[in-house]
Image: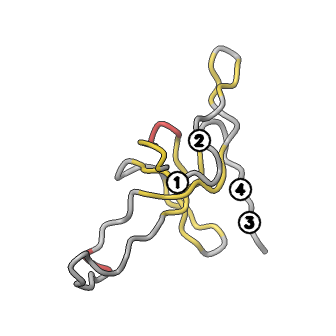
Amino acid sequence: MAIKVRPLHDRVIVKRIEEEEKSKGGIIIPDTAKEKPQEGRIISTGPGRHEDGKIIPLDVKAGDRIMFSKFAGTEINLNGQEHLIMREDDILGVIE
């Protein structure tokens, strides 16, 4: 059974984009030496943040490729895959 999650307020659900297994010089990097990637693709977004009784929509949308801060978000497991749920403030930029 597939689980569907809709984030609330200004939160987004992000799937990390995995880095390559080799370095530019062709050296294979073991899993223990890898850092978690700071890039991902937005899977789902909330409606926006509440401010003065109004909803301010998010600047990002589902499908955007983003960069986020190193310790951003909370790791969650959806349908056997690792995702992050984070606030829009943790997003550093959209990769175009």
Percent of width and height locating residue 66 = 48, 51
Of marks 1 and 4, which one's residue comes earlier in the chain? 4
The answer to which quarter of the image holds residue 80 is: bottom right
The answer to which quarter of the image holds residue 47 is: top right
Of marks 1 and 3, which one's residue comes earlier in the chain? 3
Mark 1 and mark 3: Cα distance apart in space: 23 Å
Residue that numbered label 3 is attached to = 3
Mark 1 and mark 4: Cα distance apart in space: 19 Å
Q: Secondary structure at mark 4?
A: loop
Query: Mark 3 is on which residue type?
Result: Ile
Of marks 2 and 3, which one's residue comes earlier in the chain? 3
Mark 3 and mark 4: Cα distance apart in space: 7 Å
Query: Mark 2 is on which residue type?
Result: Val
The answer to whether 68 is drawn above or below residue 29 in the figure is above
Percent of width and height locating residue 92 = 41, 42
Mark 1 and mark 2: Cα distance apart in space: 9 Å
Residue farthest to the top, as pictured = 52
Query: Mark 1 is on which residue type?
Result: Arg
The answer to whether 36 is drawn above or below residue 24 in the figure is above
Which residue is drawn at the image coordinates 65% and 46% (left, top)? 45
- The residue lying toward the viewer, choosing from 72 and 58, is 58
The answer to whether 18 is drawn above or below residue 15 in the figure is below
Residue that numbered label 4 is attached to = 5
Neighbour class for label 4 at 10 Å: few (<14), some, many (≥20)?
A: few
Residue that numbered label 2 is attached to = 60
Q: Secondary structure at mark 1?
A: strand
Q: Give the foreground label among 2 and 3.
A: 2
Q: Give the foreground label among 2 and 4.
A: 2
